[in-house]
Image: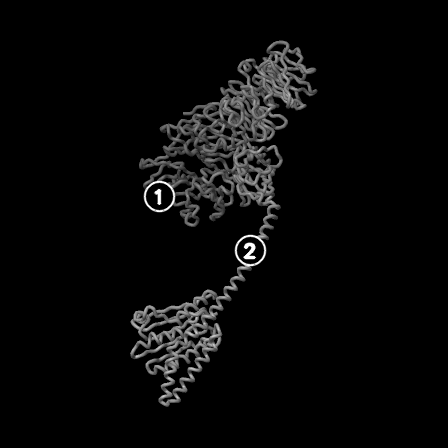
Amino acid sequence: MSTKYGFAQTAYLPHYTTKNGLPSNNCYYTLQDKRGYIWVATDAGVSRFDGTTFESFSVDDGLPDNQILQLREDRKGRIWFLSLGGQLSYFYNGKIYNPDNDKQLKKLNFNAVIVSFFEDSKGKIWFGTNKNIIGVWDGENLIKYSSTYNESQYANAYIQEDKQGNIWAYSTEAVFLFIKNNFVLIEDKTLPLSYKTLITRTDKSVYFLDNKGLNIRNGAFSSLVLNINPDLLTNRPGYIYVDEKGLWLSNNSGVYVIGFDGKIEQLLKDVDVNQVIKDSNQNIWFTTKNGIYRLPDKKERLYIFNKANGLDNEVIKSITKDANGRLWMGLGNNNINILNLRNKTIQKINIPDQKKYNIIKQLTFDAKNKQLFFASDYGVGVIKAAYPAKTEINYLKETNNSVFVVKNFSIDTTSKLALSLSSGVVIINDRLNKFEFSSLNYKEKQDYFKDRSYRVYYDQAQSLWFSNTSGLIEFNKGNLYKYYETYPLLSKRINDIKELKNNVYAMATDGYGIAILKDGVLFKRITLKDGLNNNIITKLFVKGNYLWAISNTGINRINIHNNQYTINSFDYANDLLSDDLNDLYIDADIAYFATNNGLVYFSYNKKTQQTQAPKIYISSVSVNREMLDLSADNFILKPDEKNITFNYSAIDFKNRKITYRYRLNDDDNWSETKNRRLDLSSLEPGTYTFEVSAKSQDSEWSTPAKINFVLEKHFWQTWWFLVIMLLIGAYLLYIITVKITKRQKNKEQEQLLLKNKILMLEQQALQAMMNPHFVFNVMNSIQHYINTQNTSSANKILTGFAKLIRKNLEICTKSYINLEEEIEYLNLYLSLEKNRFGDKFKYSITVDPQIDKEETLLPSMLLQPYIENAIWHGIMPKEDGGEVKLAISQKDEDYLWIKIIDNGIGIKNSLSTKNTAHQSKGMNLTQERINLLNQIEAKPIQLFVEQNGNSGTTITILVPLN
């Protein structure tokens, strides 16, 4: 079944409401300030819009009333707010001034609603009110004028200045000229419908509406320039706007564009519109009771077809174009609509035997055979391209009557048809004559096609490319090329495949961007980092040297030239398209997109790349959460005011993707960010210049916005404080040096005393070593040998004793002796003990031959007390006597190891049989001497005493090798 309708195109108007950040949808007035911001007055405060964010202000921010009816800007850049309550306020340098914080505003009290605001060439501001009052303010003094003709002639007056500097006032009842400090009535019957229906031109003439149409007035003379149907003037007119095209008339039924050529076009039908303005970028803004709308400039304009234009359903899932210039659209309600772009008609095809929830998911035109293939949830069908001349629709049959769901299909340039199914890939060799297949028979023959598939695609050489659960595969002349085995990227899910020029193929991946194969080699991967607006790419389209790609965040157009890739994102279109893109078709100069809201298209060749950078401003600066007055050129911050926050924004109503960069003090390196706020919290004291600039995707960087500030030093960081601290430090250093020197001298004196004490102890040790028992026994031995006339033995003992006494006297004056002397001394002593005890006592002395006995030093008279103790308390108590061994070795570089080993009764047995009051004086003196030496030497002497089993004792002495 086919139905034919005519259609008209509709421009798409981006719509901003509370969902986008407006404080209320009930909007009264819109203003673009000198910087480029769009200000919107509502019944819940005002908003400032930069193209991305609405910044709202209310009574909490300083407004005297949330109901703001109008907005004006004066030469100083102050944004004035005209409220329903009559109180005036203005915004300047990030702050709102009102009668409570500005004494001059207290004077501007009319007890009326201000309906008009005008600044004359002398800087005076004129106010028209809804009462019989006109006021003029020079910044300090307010003068009020009341009509002397009647009580209402000044009411709702519009004030204006002509070329000669004359001030005029227009009300619905009369026209007045300001002469000699008073308003004089000018006889004129051509009067405006309201203060909203007047607008001053750049040449200072005035357009205004009366009950006949649009008039122009120069001074006292007026003339009708455009007749208007009175029916269009009966509804409440809003603020008018006039451009070179004609009059933009707003009222409660929409906007009428009444051209000077007599043509009339209606926009926003049945929408209550209060105002129309045009901004500096040629965007038209509509202020309504349901938010604000923007009509972009023609070169940025998008057009939309939906049910209002005659489509059968707004949800469009697929599109393609046939050889006759018709655009075929697969809808979400199982139907197909055809747009004839030549004669502006729409044909509707109701696909029979379909359920209403089925969608037409793919359309492909078979140019060779002049037919169109389509896929739905029901299956695959084909329609003759001559439709509606030929209305036959054929469906692909499954001979086993199995239910099959086609994900997508592809046709080659001959007669093949490939299907992507959840059960695998199916190839039909004769799609023209035998439009059927057996999935069971096919899978038995083609095992390698059994895996779940996602996409199939025939290239110009008849090779079949497909993606399945394993990855990307090429089927060419019976051979399989499994690219996923070589490239892990190509094992990911692939949503679409397209052939480019020169044996180059593009694969749209599900989360990894676009993969580019050249001559079978993975040549390039294009991702977010390269400029894509998303890494999840759903569809591809090739047109000339351009590869188009769509995602759920918009459109990408990739220019391919000499293996280089540049990406353009149509951000001005993405406001509409973002989440709704289903399919695309790119014509010679028109790009068509299937969306859930209808068919959207725009002329992409007329869209020149944006080269002008967006304007950027520092909107506010706060220090420790306190706002700064931005009117100052420089800021002086206290040392503790380190928490600095910069808020900045770039004004661009076409591009959503704004990149910012900032730096401090002309640093060569800029830091890039998407954020519109920067927090600094760790700055050192100093002088700083903060710079920030912005760019859209296709522009250069903007001229930076700058702000200078000085972070003062703490008092302890100032030069005078540092000088004082330096002097105090020098004095303290002197005191400390004196004390250290004195302490060092005291320490030297203490060491001298210690050495003297050591010498005294050495003398005491010397005396202790010659104990009375030893001397007495030696003398008895000598007497014994004399009495028995054994003079040779007596002489021998006497000689040895004399040598021992002489040696003892030699070394007692030395703190350290070499090992050679110590061994000589010990041999003299032990030989005397041997003579006294005979065979009952044996001894031996062994020294490691690697030790240099002449160069190795140790404290004098250190070992003799321990050897004596071993003889008298270890060996002598044994009836059969015993042996004492002295072994000297060097086991490491730091210590001399000395061991005194006896096989006597053992130290534990000796201590148990001793009188507790008994003590070896020589041993005690030697231990005290060791303790003193350890206090003054870097390395201590270490002493270890242990019993060898049940008997015998080993004394180990470790002497540092200094």
Count residues near mark 2 (Cα–Cα under 10 Å), then give few for <14, some for 14-19, many for 20+: few
User: Eyeballing the image, is 645 above or below 867?
Assistant: above
Q: Where does the N terminus fall, quadrant-wise? A: top left
Answer yes or no: is residue 326 visible. Answer: no
Which residue lies at the image location 51% right of the left edge and 66% below the top edge?
A: 752
Q: Which mark is residue 223?
A: none
Of the numbered discs 2 and 1, the one sitting upstream in the chain is 1
Q: Is residue 376 left or right of residue 248?
A: left
Residue 207 position within the rendered picture, expressed as x and y whole percent measured from the top left: 62, 18
The amino acid on which the numbered mark 1 sits, given as a three-letter code, is: Lys
Given the current orientation, which residue lies at the most extreme top position?
Answer: 150
At label 2, the amino acid type is Ile
Q: Residue 736's mark?
A: 2
Is the residue marked by circle 1 packed among few (<14), some (14-19), or many (20+) residues within 10 Å? Answer: some
Residue 769 sits in quarter: bottom left
Q: Secondary structure at mark 1?
A: loop
Percent across and percent down for residue 538 are 44, 38
Q: Which residue is mark 1?
A: 450
Q: Horizontal and vertical percent for residue 595?
A: 45, 31
Front position in the image: 839 or 309: 839
**190 or 29: nearer the eye?**
29
Q: Position of residue 42 (x, y in %)?
A: 52, 23
- Do callouts 2 and 1 mark residues in contact (Cβ within 8 Å)? no
Q: Can residue 920 be seen by looking at this rendering?
A: yes
- Give the structural element (helix, strand or loop) at label 2: helix
Looking at the picture, tell me which residue is in the foreground, 229 or 141.
141
Q: Is residue 777 above or below residue 412?
A: below
